[in-house]
Amino acid sequence: MKSTLLKIRQLNLIMLLLFLFLMKGTAQYKDFKLSPKGDTLNIVDKKGLKQGKWVNTVGEVRGEPGYEEEGYYKDDKKTGPWRKYTANGDIIAIENYAFGGKSGAQQYFSFFGSLEREEEWRGYNPDAPYDTIPVYGTGNNEVIDYKIVKAEQYSVPNGDWKYYNPEGHIIRIEHYDRGQLLKEGGDKKPTTVAADKKPEEKTKPQEILDYEKKYSKKKRKQMEREGKTSL
């Protein structure tokens, strides 16, 4: 009997210490969620800024299917890789962010896991938190005042955009230079890969390998026959 009471007291003490530990760890948060595994998600700090790992659910909008995305925030700005999934858990995009905007390589996939498009983006971060812009008079180009505004991050296409057919072969390449699509006469021009040119070999991302491992080729063909199309 004494042994049982001692174990109960020890268990209660452990639970109390765990509770105090959790309270101390989350006291700095204004809001947060706990995942089924006990991980802390969707943190909003005392300043109202999103921090750490987040999972966002976006519902259907004007006929466009909803999706779920997961990644990290730093001071309310997306940073690093973000992954998007369909409602069924199939990956549809891997995007990279810096300073809150797209930066670097982006990949977009079909419902069956094949790579449809690769994009390159350049993200710009303001050197200063504020910027000064001129205020012009009505109907003329005369500057009558200056206004201080908060500087914002922005991103532009920059580099090669590659488009693939369902077999994974490149069918078109577009070249961008800091937001400008290069045409004939520039350093490069939009390119279509010749039919007799050997297609570029692609290494499948780990997410696609995991998907193919989860669903057999026969299962994916069955899903296709049932009328499920690419997103």
Image (tube, rainbow, N blue to C red):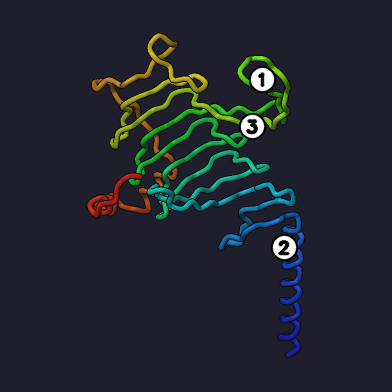
Instruction: Say whether residue 198 is visible.
Output: yes
- Quadrant of the rendered structure where residue 73 is? top right
Left of 206 or right of it: where is 22? right
Please name the residue that numbered disc 2 is placed on: 22
Q: Is residue 34 above or below residue 163?
A: below
Q: Amino acid at mark 2?
A: Leu
Q: Residue furthest front?
A: 139
Q: Secondary structure at mark 3?
A: loop
- Using the image, tell me which numbered label, if any, was put on residue 28: none
Please name the residue that numbered disc 1 is placed on: 137
Residue 157: x and y in percent read 49, 26
The tag earlier along the polypeptide, 2 or 1, is: 2
Quarter of the image with the N terminus in it: bottom right
The tag earlier along the polypeptide, 2 or 3, is: 2
Q: Is residue 133 above or below residue 97?
A: above
Mark 3 in CB contact with mark 1 (< 8 angstroms): no
Q: Secondary structure at mark 2?
A: helix
Q: Residue 73 or 20: which is nearer the viewer? A: 73
Mark 2 and mark 1: span between their CA atoms? 58 Å
Please name the residue that numbered disc 3 is placed on: 152
Q: What crowding class fits label 3: few (fewer than 14 Cα within 10 Å), some (14-19), or many (20 or more)?
A: some
Instruction: Say whether residue 128 is visible.
Output: no
Mark 3 and mark 1: span between their CA atoms? 25 Å
Q: Amino acid at mark 3?
A: Glu
Tell me the mark number nearer the camera, choosing from 2 and 3: 3
Q: Residue at x 47, y 46 (%)?
A: 84
Q: Amino acid at mark 1?
A: Gly
- Quadrant of the rendered structure where residue 22 is? bottom right
Q: Is residue 88 above or below residue 172?
A: below
